[in-house]
Amino acid sequence: MADIFDVIADGTRRDILKLLLDRSSAGENGTSVSHIVHALGVSQPTVSKHLKVLREARLVSVREEGQHRYYSLSPAPLDEVDDWLVPFLDAGQTDAPDHAPAALPDSAAHAAEVVGRAAASAKHVLENALKKLPGR
């Protein structure tokens, strides 16, 4: 399996993850390949190639209905990214209350945004799953 950092380093794959996150947050239960193609303006073979990489990294899951495939975000593998980033985020902080944290480089800020969105999506999925349990 590819290193998670290699997987999310590609801009098209990050765009696909962001689209799946946004649609999941909007209550969609999966996104079709054709919707991804249309939304990103990328060719179907390119989207399929990137979805394969994301599937292999377990960042997306797929549900088949007839000849259609619907993809959903699976943010758990991003925990490795989160674990790697946290020490860097903590390193810039001191105990002094008037000390502002150091600004993150753009690449780290983007990675942090992806991780934050993935965490929010996971929270959303968990809350929805808990609502479906009997007696809740």
Image (spheres, rainbow, N blue to C red):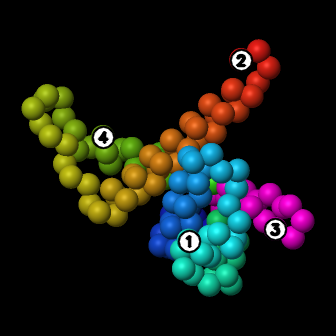
The region drawn magenta spans 56-72
Residue 56's tag is none
- Quadrant assignment for the C terminus: top right
- Residue plotted at (39% across, 44% down): 86
Circle 3 sits on which residue?
68
Circle 1 sits on which residue?
39
Between the C-alphas of marks 2 and 4, the distance is 38 Å
Q: Position of residue 103 (x, y in %)?
A: 21, 52
Label 3 or label 4, whichever comes before in sequence order: 3
Q: Position of residue 3 (x, y in %)?
A: 58, 65
Residue 136's tag is 2
Between the C-alphas of marks 2 and 3, the distance is 33 Å
Between the C-alphas of marks 3 and 4, the distance is 44 Å
Q: Secondary structure at mark 1?
A: helix
Residue 90's tag is 4
Q: Is residue 6 left or right of residue 28?
A: left
Of residues 27 and 57, the one nearer the viewer is 27
Label 1 or label 4, whichever comes before in sequence order: 1
Between the C-alphas of marks 1 and 2, the distance is 36 Å
